Image (cartoon, grey):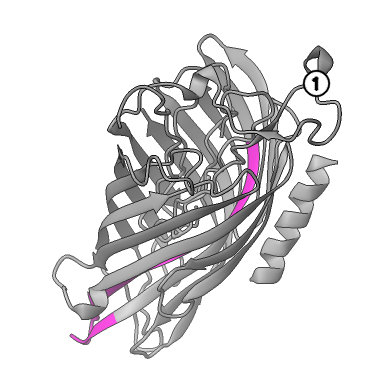
Amino acid sequence: MRSILVFVVVVIAALAGGWDAAAQTVPLPTPAPSSLDRLAQGSTFGAPLAPPPTAWDPYGPQAGQWMPVAPSSGMPAPSALGGQPGYPGWQPGSPPVVPTQGTGGTPSSLFPQGLSTTQSPAMQQTMRVFQGVRGSWAYLFGDGNGTSVGVNEFDTTATFAIPFFYHSQANLNHAPLLVTPGFGLQLWNGPETSATMLADLPPSTYDVFIDAAWNPQFTPLFGAELGIRVGIFTNWDVLVWDSWRIMGRAIGTLQLTPTMQGKAGIVYLDRNQVKILPAVGLTWVPDANSRYDIFFPAPKAARRFADLGRHSLWGFVAGEYGGGAWTFRRNTGQISPFDYNDIRISLGTEWVPKTPLGLAGSFEVGYVFYRQLFYVDGPPQIQDLPDTLMLRLGLAY
């Protein structure tokens, strides 16, 4: 599985060839794509070449993830990896530091006069408590016959910003605490259970969670992307201790150049088969029309193709580790935790407003493979599923 995602990363690398006053408009964390655990997702904020935050929800899938962007940026919020936020839906943030300008408005060298942390006009806006809402729907094709499992994934989240160590010297970008309650619903079609095929699934499962994220910049060079998510992931008639899950992420960031940021850390998925994943890579924004997240486990390459009125149109190719974990009552009457895992590669488009407020959306088509059901209490313990196609739609405001 990791080797396949590493391959996607290589492909993308190749393609790259107080409340008011000095408060700031806050980039939202990527919502987790559908209840299936998605790892999760940009826009240039203010100063030229300031890489936008990535749209990846580190905890799992949950359909696409984007957010409104700062004025004149037009960069799409990074889309998520699939699944319960990252945990599905989380995306790494972008480098907040930009080079000071030399004569003629262009950098005279890598960091010609040191690094400037001065906020641009786009960042000097009043912080709004209510940051936005998002909703998404994803469909993985399957007719329910045999092991052809189909899944409908629905997710909705709302994000609120709260000042957090606002004037601390270790929070140069005045990053707020982002609190995101969310709800997800999965509708399962199949598998077909028989005397020789014992794998089974409930008709539906759901997620109810609350996520807290903080993305401070400790120094002009070093920052972090921190988050924790607590929620219930189960079937409607089952609520046991195993239905509770705690997911999280701890990513360190290093400003390598004015347009490139390195990242390394971990994403804690709290699934039954896969508990933790390494998170490593870099984000590169060579110009205002391109963004490359050469990042495991959520690689993504995006490019702006056109400006349509008040929106910018972006195209992207992305990879993600999808799926999630829930509890349910099996056909035998036994309560059991189970995982659904897959790998998704998708092509899509995102339309993003050029102002902080506005309607954003995305549409993508993907290929889903390495699909697998894992039962803590078998039999079977592992059931492989056939490859399939995916459609995903999302809206955010």
Q: Residue furthest top?
A: 309
In the figure, is residue 66 to the left or right of 259? left
Locate the C terminus and report the quarter of the image it occupies. Answer: top left
Dot 1 amino acid type: Gly
In the figure, is residue 231 to the left or right of 385? left
Locate the N terminus and report the quarter of the image it occupies. Answer: bottom right
The number of numbered discs placed on residues in the rendered structure image is: 1
User: x and y percent of residue 371 in the render?
Assistant: 52, 68
Check the image and report above or below for 396 versus 12.
above
**Along the line of sight, which residue is nearer the eye, 256 or 384?**
256
Is residue 38 at least partly visible in the picture?
yes
Residue lying at 29% horizontally and 53% vertically, measured from the top left: 184
Numbered range of the magenta stretch: 316-336
In the figure, is residue 226 to the left or right of 313? left
User: x and y percent of residue 143 in the render?
Assistant: 41, 59
**Along the line of sight, which residue is nearer the eye, 295 or 11?**
295
Residue lying at 71% horizontally and 36% vertically, measured from the top left: 285
Q: Is residue 104 one of those drawn in magenta?
A: no
User: x and y percent of residue 213 in the render?
Assistant: 39, 51
Is residue 82 at least partly visible in the picture?
no
Q: Tell me the element at label 1.
A: loop
Residue lying at 34% horizontally and 39% vertically, measured from the top left: 135
Task: Kindly indicate the quadrant of the structure image that contains residue 20.
Answer: top left
Residue lying at 42% horizontally and 28% vertically, measured from the top left: 25
Q: Is residue 321 one of those drawn in magenta?
A: yes
**Along the line of sight, which residue is nearer the eye, 239 or 164?**
164
Q: Main secondary structure of the magenta part?
A: strand
In the figure, is residue 329 to the left or right of 293? left
Check the image and report above or below for 228 versus 255.
below
Circle 1 residues within 10 Å: few <14, some 14–19, many ≥20:
few
User: x and y percent of residue 215 in the render?
Assistant: 47, 48
- Which residue is label 1 attached to? 102
